[in-house]
Amino acid sequence: MSAAAPHSASAAPAPALSQETLDRFAREIAKYPYEGRASAVMACLSIAQQQHGHVYPEHEKIIGELLGMPTIAVHEVTTFYNMYNQQPVGKFKLNVCTNLPCQLRDGYKALHHLEHKLGITMGETTADGLFTLQQSECLGACADSPVMLVNDRTMCSFMSNEKLDQLIDGLRAAEGKA
């Protein structure tokens, strides 16, 4: 199964944000003076993503209205940071750095190895929904390259093919899909 197509006007409408999510937005927004409420944009995007697994364009619009921001400005934040998913992703999101320092130390080799091992190409999700493979901008660990970020939280350094195989096999085993 490939990753879902980006949202479009013909896509099904976004699910509603829960009252709990809206209350969490309000708590974040209250941390800032009224004129600076746009500073809560990243927190609100994270909260919306926690509820639905990714950020829907309709949710960007709601966040913009709450923060007094144009929807496009919220969308710019969503698209700038790779921690925000614009479409559904697998249980394990693998972001492989392919910027120059990592390229010089086999970043693309790591990406291609993962494509082969997972049977998908960059930007796709495995049929079992476990893995989404993405290219990433610099992760700030150039001395440890090639590097990869798992689920926007766990940095993996010096990613040789052997280490990549161990990581993928370990994640599959943890899910009972080894």
Image: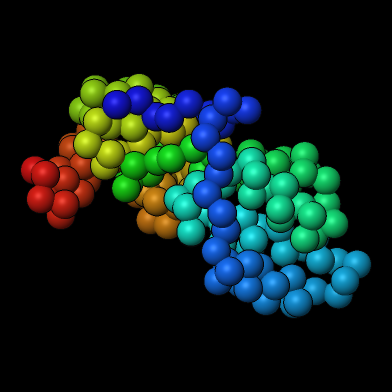
In the picture provided, is 26 more to the left or to the right than 104? Answer: right
Q: Which residue appears farthest toward the right when viewing the image?
A: 35
> x%, y% of residue 110?
33, 30
**Nearer to me, 148 or 178:** 178
**In the rendered picture of this protein, how many numbered marks are placed on residues?**
0
Which residue is drawn at the image coordinates 55% and 64% (left, top)?
18
Which residue is drawn at the image coordinates 64% and 41% (left, top)?
57
> x%, y% of residue 129?
28, 39
**Nearer to me, 132 or 105:** 132
Q: Colour mode? A: rainbow
In the picture provided, is 49 more to the left or to the right than 146? Answer: right
Instruction: Decide if residue 144 is in sight here.
Output: yes
As displayed, is residue 53 above or below residue 135? below
In the picture provided, is 37 more to the left or to the right than 4? Answer: right
Which residue is drawn at the image coordinates 58% and 25% (left, top)?
10
> x%, y% of residue 106?
37, 28
As displayed, is residue 40 above or below residue 60? below
As displayed, is residue 61 above or below residue 106? below
Q: Quadrant of the C terminus?
A: top left
Q: Quadrant of the N terminus?
A: top left
State the image quarter where residue 48 is shown.
bottom right
State the image quarter where residue 76 is shown.
top right
Which residue is drawn at the image coordinates 71% and 53% (left, top)?
62
Instruction: Decide if residue 157 is in sight here.
Output: no
> x%, y% of residue 74?
73, 47
In the picture provided, is 112 more to the left or to the right than 175? Answer: right
State the image quarter where residue 3 is shown.
top left
